[in-house]
């Protein structure tokens, strides 16, 4: 190798060395490491709408005239009734007499002359026996003979009354109140049933 060429190589190498000394290495990107897990964002909880409470109004006595009468398929009695004794609870298609005597007391005295119309049938041993009906000092009787399908083919029983116009009470005496349990010991119903009333009207 000639001296000129060798000198050139030394000069080039030196230049490279000087250039390398001037350059600084770029710092590595800082990476933070944590051993605590970062909780993910909790899903938003949407509260279900609260339904407003359903308010069921209790049944009320209904408006009716004496001629429209008592509809025993309704849960309560009409407004012209002051008090009732001897009747069992509401059963949708009728209401049973319970015990030896039924009394309907009206808010006003009954008319002097009127016709009592009753749609009813009887329980067991009461069928075909005389039923007493009294207003004041006047007493009448009638007999119910149950049809084969009383709910579908009701019979209207009519009784004419002529009174002093002072009595506000109608009394009905079932002939032989009997409990279902008496007829069938396996039946737990011990009510003394007599007449199943469907309707009762007072027509002047």
Image (cartoon, rainbow, N blue to C red):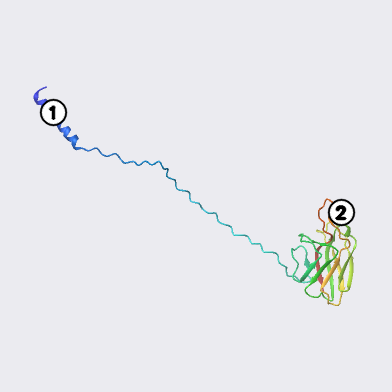
Give the vertical position of 159 relative to 176 (above or below): below
Total count of labels: 2
Query: Which residue is outermost to the left?
Result: 3
Give the labeled residue for mark 2: 183
Residue closer to the observer: 78 or 188: 188
Counting other residues with Cα less than 10 Å from the Cα at mark 2, is it few (<14), some (14-19), or many (20 or more)?
few
In the figure, residue 67 lies in which quadrant? bottom right
Looking at the picture, how far across and down is residue 165, in whole percent?
84, 77
Q: Is residue 166 left or right of 33 when viewed as pictured?
A: right
Callout 1: SS: helix
**Image quadrant occupied by the C terminus:** bottom right
Taking the spot 10% from the left edge, 27% from the top edge, the residue there is 7
**Image quadrant occupied by the N terminus:** top left
Looking at the picture, how far across and down is residue 195, in whole percent?
84, 62
Q: Is residue 91 left or right of 37 when viewed as pictured?
A: right
Give the vertical position of 3 relative to 169 (above or below): above
Looking at the picture, how far across and down is residue 9, in whole percent?
13, 27
Nearer-N-terminus badge (1/2): 1
Counting other residues with Cα less than 10 Å from the Cα at mark 1, is it few (<14), some (14-19), or many (20 or more)?
few
Taking the spot 11% from the left edge, 28% from the top edge, the residue there is 8
Residue closer to the observer: 9 or 71: 9
Callout 2: SS: helix
Q: Which mark is residue 10?
A: 1
Residue 132 visible, this orientation: yes
In the figure, residue 32 lies in which quadrant? top left
Looking at the picture, how far across and down is residue 203, in whole percent?
82, 72
Q: Is residue 9 left or right of 192 when viewed as pictured?
A: left
């Amino acid at each position: 190798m000639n001296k000129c060429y060798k000198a050139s190589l030394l000069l080039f190498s030196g230049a490279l060395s000087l250039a390398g000394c001037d350059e600084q290495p770029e710092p590595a990107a800082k990476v933070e490491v944590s051993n605590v897990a970062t909780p993910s964002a909790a899903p938003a909880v949407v509260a279900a709408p609260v339904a407003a409470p359903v308010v069921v109004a209790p049944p009320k006595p209904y408006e009716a005239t004496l001629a429209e009468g008592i509809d025993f398929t309704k849960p309560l009695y009409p407004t012209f009734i002051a008090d009732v004794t001897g009747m069992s609870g509401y059963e949708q298609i009728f209401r049973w007499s319970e015990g030896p005597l039924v009394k309907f007391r009206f808010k006003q005295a009954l008319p002097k002359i009127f016709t009592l119309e009753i749609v009813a049938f009887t329980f067991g041993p009461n069928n075909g026996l005389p039923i007493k009906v009294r207003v004041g000092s006047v007493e009448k009787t009638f007999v119910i003979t149950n049809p084969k399908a009383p709910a579908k083919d009701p019979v209207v029983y009519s009784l004419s009354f002529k009174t002093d116009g002072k009595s506000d009470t109608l009394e009905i005496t079932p002939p032989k109140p009997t409990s279902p349990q008496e007829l069938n010991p396996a039946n737990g119903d011990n009510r003394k049933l007599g007449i199943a009333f469907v309707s009762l009207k007072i027509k002047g």
